[in-house]
């Protein structure tokens, strides 16, 4: 039995792959990392990526008590998402080749949309730097605030990306278009609602954005009886004597809630806990922002939640704490939590360089197993797999197009969100 696609189908698939590549808007903002797929299969589709070292410095000539351990931190990336679009065509329907082409177009559009949604959702829920605006999007000042927070906390100035929902993007473009119209940037904003580079960020218009619900919990306080701080560790020893890597992006804290419940995605600050510059360790004068990433036990009353980033205050004085310190002080028992997402709003994510990453995966169906198989890869590493199988009983033909990938926030402290019209 021949298992090859006709020439017309191969050409149509090539065109579909090209259009699929063009449709990957959000994924173009992220760093795409191509991995050896054999190795990924042998490691359970998990790969650990090292984070950059941050070192401490000391005053004076005497270094006797300053030789401390150095921790190399790493974060796991996982290829954990597979999406497919299947359809069936009868022998009569196949007489109209145009129908088959339209379905292929819809298939690639849906899969591209799935990847974009995955990237924007991860970035919107994991970005720990929160810029809250009480007004609607207006223009340069909005993006400049993100630049201010990034710069004061030591985030590198190159390769900064910002994705804006259509309404917010167009509001900013309107502000730019209303300025002097004798330069190309203002004209482009007026004619195409295009922003381009603003305040050090490459801006992109998202087709859609994650909508963050308003925080409803009230009277929320820290309930840890000991000073609440986190000590980074590169790995930990299991009961079997095996050392395994530790994901240092998260910390579990205890809280008390007077009214309603906390939710995943809630943004908050903690009283008297300021952010520091990650290299210089100087107080920025601004409260550090955090996100709730998981409800561990209880969303109301008393319970525990997982947050990002961890609270690294250098209270314990260990080498890793001094190296990766991100706050001025550990919060005390009873410290008040203040939520920033006070009104439901579309989320506008931004990040720097490799902070948001995508891991394209590969599928390898056997071509001699009764299916026709054709595969292709986009310029930035995404693979599409189209398979076809006929049914001799009724002459129907089944088709499916598959994509497999993983996306992850490699460094939540180099990622953020901007939310508008908050109270």
Image (tube, rainbow, N blue to C red):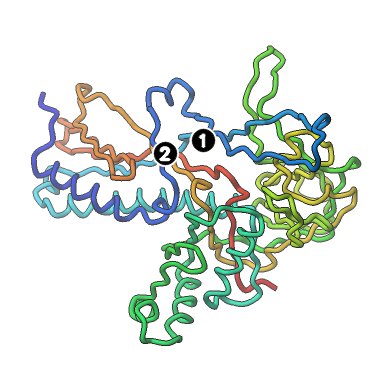
In this picture, residue 97 sits left or right of residue 156: left
The kind of secondary structure element at disc 1 is strand
| Side (left or right) of 129 relative to 81 | right
Dot 1 or dot 2, earlier in sequence? 2
Q: Are marks 1 and 2 in contact (CB under 8 Å)?
A: yes
Q: Residue furthest front?
A: 61
Mark 1 vs mark 2, foreground winner is 2
Residue 77 got which mark? 1
Q: Secondary structure at mark 2?
A: loop
Query: Which residue corresponds to the image point at 54% horizontal and 78% vertical from the top-left?
Result: 138
Residue 422 occupies quadrant: bottom right
Q: According to the image, label 2 marks what residue?
A: 33
Q: Is residue 298 above or below residue 191?
A: above
Residue 76 location in percent, x, y?
55, 34
* Residue 160, x across and y down, in percent: 50, 57
CA separation in Å, label 1 and label 2? 10 Å
Q: Look at 19% across and 38% down and name the residue there.
A: 397
């Amino acid at each position: 039995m021949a298992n090859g696609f006709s020439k017309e189908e191969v050409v149509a698939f090539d065109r579909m792959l090209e259009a699929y590549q063009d449709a990957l808007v959000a994924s173009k903002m992220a760093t795409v990392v191509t991995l050896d797929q054999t190795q990924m299969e042998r490691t359970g589709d998990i790969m650990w990526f090292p984070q950059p070292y941050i070192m401490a410095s000391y005053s004076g000539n005497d270094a006797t008590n300053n030789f401390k351990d150095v921790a190399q931190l790493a974060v796991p990336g996982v290829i954990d998402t597979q999406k497919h679009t299947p359809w069936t065509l009868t022998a009569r329907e196949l007489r109209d080749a145009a129908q088959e082409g339209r379905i292929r177009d819809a298939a690639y559009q849906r899969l591209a949309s799935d990847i974009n949604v995955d990237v924007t959702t991860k970035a919107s829920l994991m970005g720990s730097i929160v810029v809250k605006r009480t007004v609607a999007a207006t223009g340069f000042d909005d993006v400049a605030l993100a630049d201010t927070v990034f710069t004061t906390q030591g985030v590198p100035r190159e390769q900064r990306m910002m994705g804006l929902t259509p309404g917010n993007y167009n509001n900013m473009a309107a502000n730019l278009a209303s300025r002097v119209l004798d330069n190309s940037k203002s004209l482009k904003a007026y004619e195409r609602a295009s922003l381009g580079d603003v305040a050090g960020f490459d801006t992109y218009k998202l087709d859609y954005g994650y909508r963050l619900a308003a925080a409803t919990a009230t009277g929320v306080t820290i309930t840890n009886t000991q000073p609440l701080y986190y000590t980074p560790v590169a790995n930990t020893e299991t009961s079997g004597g095996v050392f395994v890597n530790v994901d240092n992006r998260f910390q579990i804290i205890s809280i008390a809630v007077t009214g309603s419940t906390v939710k995943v995605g809630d943004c908050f600050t903690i009283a008297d806990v300021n952010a520091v510059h990650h290299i210089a360790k100087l107080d920025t004068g601004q409260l550090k922002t955090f996100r709730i990433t998981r409800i561990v036990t209880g969303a109301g009353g008393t319970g525990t939640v997982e947050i990002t980033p961890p609270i690294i205050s250098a209270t314990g004085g260990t080498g890793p704490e001094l190296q990766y310190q991100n706050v001025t002080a550990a919060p005390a028992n009873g410290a008040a939590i203040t939520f920033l997402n006070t009104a439901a709003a579309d989320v506008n994510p931004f990040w720097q360089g490799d902070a948001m990453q995508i891991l394209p995966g590969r599928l390898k169906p056997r071509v001699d197993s009764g299916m026709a198989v054709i595969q292709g890869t986009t310029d930035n590493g995404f693979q599409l797999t189209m398979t076809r199988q006929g049914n001799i009983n009724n002459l129907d033909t089944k088709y499916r197009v598959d994509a497999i990938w993983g996306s992850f926030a490699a460094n939540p402290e180099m990622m953020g969100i901007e939310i508008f019209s908050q109270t």
